[in-house]
Structure formats: C-alpha cells, structure tokens
Image (cartoon, grey):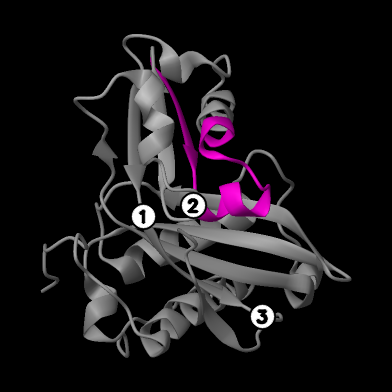
Amino acid sequence: MFKERTCMTFDLTIDEGTYLVQLARRTIEASFTKAKVSFADAPPKTREVCGVFVTLNSLRGREKLLRGCIGYPYPIKPLVEAVNDVAKAAAFEDPRFPRLAKSELEKIVIEVSVLTPPESIRGLKPEQYPSIVRVGVDGLIIKRGGRSGLLLPQVATEWDWDSDEFLSQACVKAGLSPDAWLLPGTDVSRFQAIIFVEIIPSGEIKRAETQG
C-alpha cells in the first residue's frame, strides 16, 4: 500500500533519483516493444505521492534542445506511477513535438523534476512578487480566467531571466499577456523541485543543484 504523505519536507538520494530517471528511460523503451515495466524494485521513497515532470532534451553537440516535457504539477500519484505516466506522455503526447522515434533514444537525455506542492502567493501586492520569487529555486504556475502556465525552476536559469522576466514568461506560457501577473485576479503559485538529469544518454545521472 502506497503512503499518502506528500513531499513538503521530502528529499531523495542520488540512488533514488537515478532509479526514477532510469525508470523514465525504461518506460519509453518499453513503449516501443509493448513490454510491461515493473516497479517491484522501487525504493520506498520513490513510492511517495509527489508532483513530477519528465523532460526530454535532444543533444546536438554541446547544445540541448527541448524534445518533450510533461508532468503532474500536483501530488496525485506515487512517484513511480507518475513517472511512468509522464515519461510516455513527454515522449509521445507533447503537442509541441512529433512522437519520439526509437532512433532518437540514443540522442536524448532525460531529466526528472520532483515537485513540492505548489503554494499560492498570498498577502502581497503583485509588484512585490519579484522580491520573493527565487530564480533557479522556485518554479511558477500562473492561472487566470481558465488559462494556466507552468515553468520549472531550471527554465529561468537556462534562459538567464530575472524574477520579473520569469513571471512574465510564465504568463506567456499560459497564453496571457506578459504583465498579467500584475492584474487583480491572477493567481501566482510557486514550488520547488529536486532535479535529476542524465549527463549523456543512458549514462551517468547527477542531481542538479538549485541556484538561489
């Protein structure tokens, strides 16, 4: 029976993170052969209920190009089940990209981001939000009028955004105007992530350090 505790003060070792990244790759590989993926050997903490995203990046020389990214922002399933779901979705169901071809697997590096539950920012004026959004540490979810946009913490670092630009880009991701985070009625939530990533396809896996 899986525990229902969420990962508010939860951490993962490099071995546990490695298991999740390797699970994501095994899941995608198994999709091509219709094989079933087993969770029987899953470490106990990888059975906790947490939000999670799987990101696929295509390697071209030293450059990494996004190839798919899908996740569960909120803790609704045990991690092993969630990773199994979203790894397949990132590979085959991200509407921004064609379905991943089997021949691409050897050029793809996989990243797993385990999320803390998002917390809505309350009690501040919108113009104060940039002062508490920590670039490289916090991820963002912007919601307004039925639209929603999420950006993982590492995105701001990769694009060298400050907190104002990060808020604006989260609005753009939601299909809103860049200044929508300043408008009354816009909900801004933040979360953190534990991030594990392959250095090379099917190779060494490291924990990405957050940058506060």
Taking 146 as reference, is 129 above or below it? below
Query: Mark 2 highlights which residue?
Result: 153
Q: Residues within 10 Å of mark 2 (few under 14, many from 20)?
A: many
Residue at left offset 34%, top offset 71%? 80
Q: Point out the frontmost of discs 3 and 1.
A: 1
In front of the other: label 3 or label 2? 2
Q: In which quadrant will I find the N terminus?
A: bottom left
In-front residue for pair 30/152: 152
State the residue at coordinates (36%, 61%): 82
Disc 1 vs disc 2: Cβ atoms closer than 8 Å? Answer: yes
Query: Could you tell me how far apart the alpha carbons at marks 1 and 2 are, in whole angstroms?
Result: 7 Å
Which residue type does callout 3 highlight?
Ile
Give the spatial CA distance, label 3 vs label 1: 22 Å
Q: Are marks 3 and 2 in contact (CB under 8 Å)?
A: no
Label located before the other in sequence (1 or 2): 2
The part of the chain drawn in magenta is 146-166
